[in-house]
Amino acid sequence: VFFFAGLIVLVEPRSNVHSLPHAIWLTIVTMTTVGYGDITPTTKSGFFAVSALVIVSVLFMAMPIGIIGHSFTIAWSDRKQILLIERTRELLQQAGYTPEDMHVLFSSFD
């Protein structure tokens, strides 16, 4: 964030990017792909810096999003089993069974 913000401050005129906090704002908005459009580069060097920032941001965010997506897929594929376990626990608790009762019940069938 600070590297690209500093680079943007160096290459953009002060009339466009007034200070480092403005450049940090532009960097964060660009990295998160929000892109409000309130601050945009005006010079070729600025366009190049922001373009590089976009490419680096996409590459940087691709791995964590892939990991989160994979974890969600695993949880989603196990959802029926998880829901069955939760429902069974609720019914057993409503019937007055405790975890110790389950141990005795399964021991008698082994």
Image (cartoon, grey):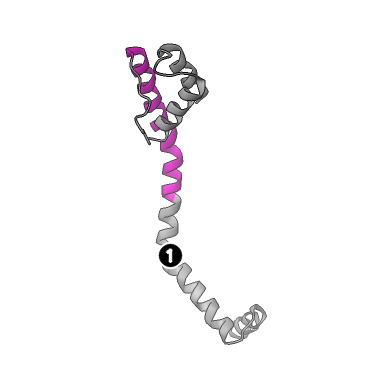
Q: Is residue 102 above or below residue 69?
A: below
User: Is residue 35 on the magenta stretch?
Assistant: no
Query: At which x and y percent is residue 99?
Result: 64, 78
Query: Is 12 in front, or is 14?
Result: 14
Query: At which x and y percent is residue 47?
Result: 34, 18
Extent of the magenta region: 43-70
Query: Is 35 in front, or is 79?
Result: 35
Neighbor class of circle 1 (other Cα within 10 Å; few <14, some 14-19, many 20+) is few
Seen at 58% across and 81% down, the residue is: 93
Query: At which x and y percent is residue 73?
Result: 40, 54
Quadrant of residue 78 in the image? bottom left
Q: Quadrant of the C terminus?
A: bottom right
Q: Is residue 100 above or below residue 33?
A: below
Quadrant of residue 108 in the image? bottom right
Q: Which residue is mark 1?
A: 79
Q: Residue furthest front?
A: 15
Query: What amino acid is labelled 1 in the image?
Result: Arg
| Numbered label tally | 1
| Badge 1 element | helix
Query: At which x and y percent is residue 50?
Result: 38, 22
User: Is residue 54 on the magenta stretch?
Assistant: yes
Q: Is residue 102 above or below residue 44?
A: below
Seen at 43% across and 19% down, the residue is: 17
Seen at 38% across and 25% down, the residue is: 39
Seen at 38% across and 36% down, the residue is: 34
Magenta segment main secondary structure: helix
